[in-house]
């Protein structure tokens, strides 16, 4: 990997670096959604939802299309879900390591 590729990858990971955006991607993993659908999920103002959606769109993770007056969002790169699955593996491994350390300390 060269420096430019590393920067491009970091931009994508940065776009995924907010819990609200992870929730949006998770929701889109089950199908296309209207932007308004994210309001009750995130419990934030419409402007905040729009900024998160723009960040994901600018990173190339999601796309949008008009459907009448609604703007529908689509997970354009579902392979990102594998990265999210990997984070769960990291969390499990870290939990296991911490448990082992605590067992040694407590013994």
Image: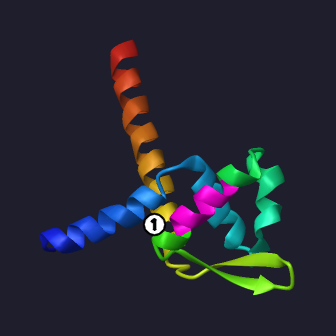
Instruction: Residue at 76%, 67% (x, y): give it.
Output: 35
Q: Badge 1: how crowded within 10 Å, few (<14), some, or many (20+)?
A: few
Q: Nearer the viewer, residue 49 or 93?
A: 49
Q: Which residues are magenta?
A: 49-56
Q: Report x, y in % for residue 85.
A: 52, 63
Quarter containing the N terminus: bottom left
Q: Position of residue 48 (x, y in %)?
A: 66, 50
Name the residue located 59 percent from the left edge and 57 percent from the top edge. 52
Q: Main secondary structure of the magenta part?
A: helix
Residue at 40% x, 22% y is 102
Task: Name the outermost residue toward the top.
Answer: 106
Whether residue 107 appears in this view of the structure is no
Residue 37: x and y, percent?
Answer: 82, 63
Q: Residue furthest left?
A: 2
Residue 73 against residue 25 in the figure, above or below: below
Residue 38 shows in the view: yes
């Amino acid at each position: 990997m060269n420096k430019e590729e590393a920067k491009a990858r970091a931009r994508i990971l940065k776009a995924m670096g907010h819990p609200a955006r992870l929730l949006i991607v998770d929701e889109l993993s089950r199908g296309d959604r209207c932007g308004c659908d994210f309001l009750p999920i995130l419990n934030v103002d419409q402007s905040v939802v729009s900024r998160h959606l723009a960040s994901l769109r600018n990173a190339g993770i999601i796309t949008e299309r008009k459907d009448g007056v609604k703007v529908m969002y689509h997970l354009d790169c579902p392979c990102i879900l594998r990265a999210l699955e990997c984070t769960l593996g990291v969390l499990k491994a870290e939990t296991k390591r911490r448990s082992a350390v605590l067992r040694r300390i407590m013994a």
